[in-house]
Amino acid sequence: MPRNTAATQSQKKNAPTTKEMCDWLRERIRRGRFVPGQRLVEADIISETGASRVRVREAFQRLEGEGLVEIEEFRGASVKRFTPGEIRQIYRARMALEGLAAAEFAGADAPDLKKQLKEIQDEMDEWEENGGHDRFAMLNNSWHQLILDGAGNEYVKQFISYLTVPIYRLLFSTFYTKERIRLANADHRKITSAILEGRVDDAERAMRQHISDGLNALSELDSQFH
């Protein structure tokens, strides 16, 4: 058998690991580069990433376990489509987990993170008036992420990250009118105030209601489910 060239050996050494491939695929699903129902073509992914076929298939299998990818005989892997019922289940799980995170952050001794939360809230208040859909959606994401950081519960943080990947684009789409932004930010102010003042039960209750309100907003966007 011919020996591998130095270049080939270098390529193999620098090829993405299974974990790196999972991260690469997950981020593209999150950002909408790969959309629900889209086939994930092994050859294209190998060409773009330099990963081996084995690593790509291992990544597909892991993401299938996370519920992000479907693998079918003779068809291969594709991005999973979520039904309205599955979306509701995701939101109900978020209600419990993010409610817990808000409560734990409210009870935490974390003055620096709470200061950051206040700063993000102040900026959201400004963008509520400006009606900036994209900027407000990005701030909303940072606000939720900071609450998870402030809770200091890595398990909750990990579970939420899995839950939000498949609905990331839907989360952005909920801020489709100035009125919806106004209503969402009214929730934000209640939650931020409860966290800053250490009102644990109020923070959890308000966060659960906020997530529920988000699900209700999505019910007005049925076309996004298909």
Image (cartoon, grey):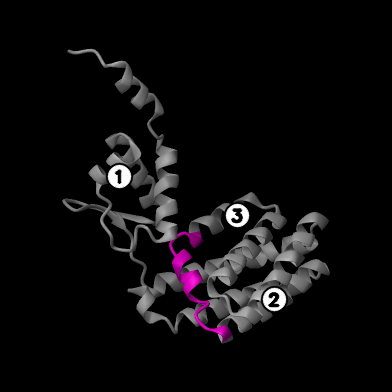
Residue lying at the far bottom in this picture: please name it. 179
* Measured Cα–Cα span from mark 3 to mark 1: 29 Å
Which tag is nearer the camera, tag 3 or tag 1? 1
Residue 109 visible, this angle: no
Marked residue nearer the N-terminal end (1 or 2): 1
Q: Are marks 1 and 2 in contact (CB under 8 Å)?
A: no
98 in the magenta segment: no
Q: Is residue 212 left or right of residue 120?
A: left
How far across and down, in percent of the image, does residue 2 sit?
19, 13
- Residue beneath disc 1: 45
- Residue beneath disc 2: 125
- Residue beneath disc 3: 157
* Measured Cα–Cα span from mark 1 to mark 2: 41 Å
Q: Which residue occupies 52% across, 83% down?
A: 177
Q: Which residues are magenta?
A: 163-178
Quarter of the rendering containing residue 54: top left
Marked residue nearer the N-terminal end (2 or 3): 2
Q: Which residue occupies 27% across, 36% down?
A: 53
Q: Front-most of 79 and 119? A: 119
Which tag is nearer the camera, tag 1 or tag 2? 2
Q: Is residue 93 left or right of residue 143?
A: left
Marked residue nearer the N-terminal end (3 or 1): 1
Q: Is residue 79 above or below residue 224?
A: above
171 in the magenta segment: yes
Mark 3 Cα shell of 10 Å, populated few (<14), some (14-19), many (≥20): some
Q: Which residue occupies 37% across, 58% down?
A: 33
Amino acid type at circle 3 is Lys
How far across and down, in percent of the image, does residue 196 sit?
80, 67
Q: Are marks 3 and 1 in contact (CB under 8 Å)?
A: no
Q: Is residue 143 above or below residue 174?
A: above
Which tag is nearer the camera, tag 2 or tag 3? 2
